């Protein structure tokens, strides 16, 4: 057998071996990429749960303030309950900051500047008290959003309606007299 034929057979054997091992190599690459995807999904899931917890705590603080204003919560219990919720919200915000800082360097400074810009845009020259932290700002924004939205209920079906609604979104009954 000639030397050239031997090299040809060896080259063909290597090509066949590489072709047959391709699915196994591909599977290993998929495992590595799926592990990286799982880590990213886990991080995004944590971020999502922290955002949901932040929103839940803000709503709870709003409800607590509202209940206190209505006299449903004793004056001696209100400060301790509010401070406990506020501390839990601050802890959630710190965890969110840690996630964002680890995701992008300098994220906290950029976020602070964005929040200050948003505050200036929202309030104009009217300065908010300096001790108002992010939780207090979010509570104030949520209160402003809720003010004036509800106009009552439909006289026909009882569905909640907004002030700008002319007809009930559920049954279509006219809400205002034409004129």
Image: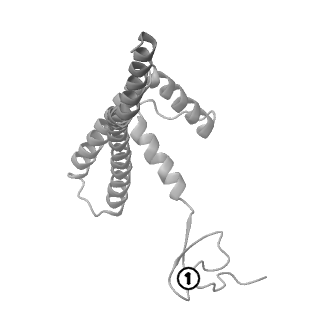
Q: Can residue 29 be seen in this view?
A: no
Residue 156: percent from left, percent from top = 56, 89
Residue projecting furthest to the bottom: 156
Residue projecting furthest to the top: 3
Q: In this view, does 27 lie to the left or right of 160?
A: left
State the residue at coordinates (59%, 35%).
126
Residue 170: percent from left, percent from top = 56, 81
- Its colouring scheme is one colour
Does 25 sit above or below residue 169?
A: above
**Location of residue 42 (image quadrant):** top left
**Location of residue 86 (image quadrant):** top left
Please state, as top left, top right, bottom left or bottom right, where the C terminus lies in the image. Answer: bottom right
Judging by the rendered image, the residue that carries numbered circle 1 is 154
Considering depth in this image, is 155 or 73 the residue closer to the camera? 155
State the residue at coordinates (28%, 36%).
91
Number of marks in the rendered image:
1
Q: How crowded is mark 1: few (under 14 residues within 10 Å), some or many (20 or more)?
A: many
Q: Is residue 9 left or right of residue 141?
A: left
Residue projecting furthest to the right: 179
Does 32 sit above or below residue 49?
A: above
Does 149 sit above or below residue 130?
A: below
Please state, as top left, top right, bottom left or bottom right, where the N terminus lies in the image. Answer: top left
State the residue at coordinates (38%, 19%).
10
- Per the image, label 1 sits on a secondary structure element best described as loop
Considering depth in this image, is 107 or 115 the residue closer to the camera? 107
Residue 111: percent from left, percent from top = 49, 28
Does 60 sit above or below residue 133?
A: below
Residue 162: percent from left, percent from top = 58, 70
């Amino acid at each position: 057998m000639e030397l050239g034929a031997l090299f040809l057979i060896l080259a063909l054997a290597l090509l066949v071996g590489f072709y047959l091992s391709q699915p196994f190599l591909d599977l290993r690459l998929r495992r590595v990429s799926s592990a990286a995807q799982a880590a990213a999904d886990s991080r995004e899931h944590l971020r999502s749960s922290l955002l949901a917890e932040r929103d839940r705590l803000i709503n709870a603080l709003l409800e607590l303030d509202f209940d206190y204003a209505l006299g449903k919560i004793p004056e001696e219990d209100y400060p301790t309950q509010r401070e406990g919720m506020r501390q839990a919200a601050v802890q959630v915000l710190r965890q969110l900051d840690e996630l964002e800082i680890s995701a992008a360097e300098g994220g906290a400074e950029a976020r602070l500047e964005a929040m200050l810009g948003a505050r200036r845009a929202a309030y104009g020259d009217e300065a908010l008290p300096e001790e108002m932290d992010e939780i207090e700002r979010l509570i104030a924004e949520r209160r402003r959003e809720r003010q004036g939205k509800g106009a009552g209920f439909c006289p026909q079906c009882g569905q909640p309606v907004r002030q700008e609604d002319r007809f009930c979104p559920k049954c279509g009954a006219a809400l205002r007299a034409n004129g």
